[in-house]
Amino acid sequence: METTPPLFDPNVNQRDTRVLTAHARAANEGIISKHFGNKIIDELFDRFHKKAEENSSLLNNPSYLSNQLFLVLIRK
């Protein structure tokens, strides 16, 4: 049986919001671009990064083993 290591070290309390934003963008940019176009991508993830910075205390809480992303986008 093979096991894979955790995606992050649970003993490390510091989470880098730049890395979080880059991972969120890599995972979601394609589908968001397909539905809403490329024009909003930079602004969307700039805002995401600002929100992550504002709430970095939640990211650095050791009781949070994972994070979830919930986006609501409205087509203009």
Image: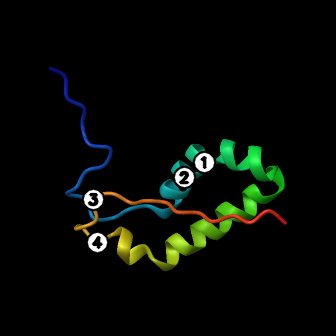
Among all residues in the image, which is located at the extreme left? 1
Which residue is denoted by mark 2 in the rendering?
A: 24
Which residue is denoted by mark 1 in the rendering?
A: 28
Q: In which quarter of the image is residue 3?
A: top left
Q: Nearer the viewer, residue 29 or 19?
A: 29
Q: Residue at left 83%, top 55%? A: 39
Q: Which of 13 and 3 is in front in this view?
A: 3
Quarter of the C terminus within the rendering: bottom right
Mark 3 vs mark 4, CA separation in Å: 9 Å
Which of disc 4 and disc 2 is earlier in sequence?
2
Q: Could you say where residue 55 lies in the image, as x and y percent from the top left?
A: 45, 77
Which of disc 3 and disc 2 is earlier in sequence?
2
Q: Could you say where residue 72 lies in the image, as x and y percent from the top left?
A: 63, 65
Amino acid type of the residue that numbered disc 4 sits on in the rendered structure: Asn
Mark 1 vs mark 3, CA separation in Å: 21 Å
Q: What element carries label 1?
A: helix
Q: Residue at left 28%, top 71%? A: 61
Q: Could you say where residue 64 lies in the image, as x and y percent from the top left?
A: 28, 65
Which residue is denoted by mark 3 in the rendering?
A: 65
Which residue is denoted by mark 4 in the rendering?
A: 61
Mark 2 vs mark 3, CA separation in Å: 16 Å
Q: Nearer the viewer, residue 57 or 2?
A: 2
**2 vs 1, front mark:** 1
Asked whether the residues under the numbered discs 4 and 1 touch, taking CB atoms below 8 Å apart as contact, a structural biologist would say no
Q: In this view, does 76 lie above or below 19?
A: below
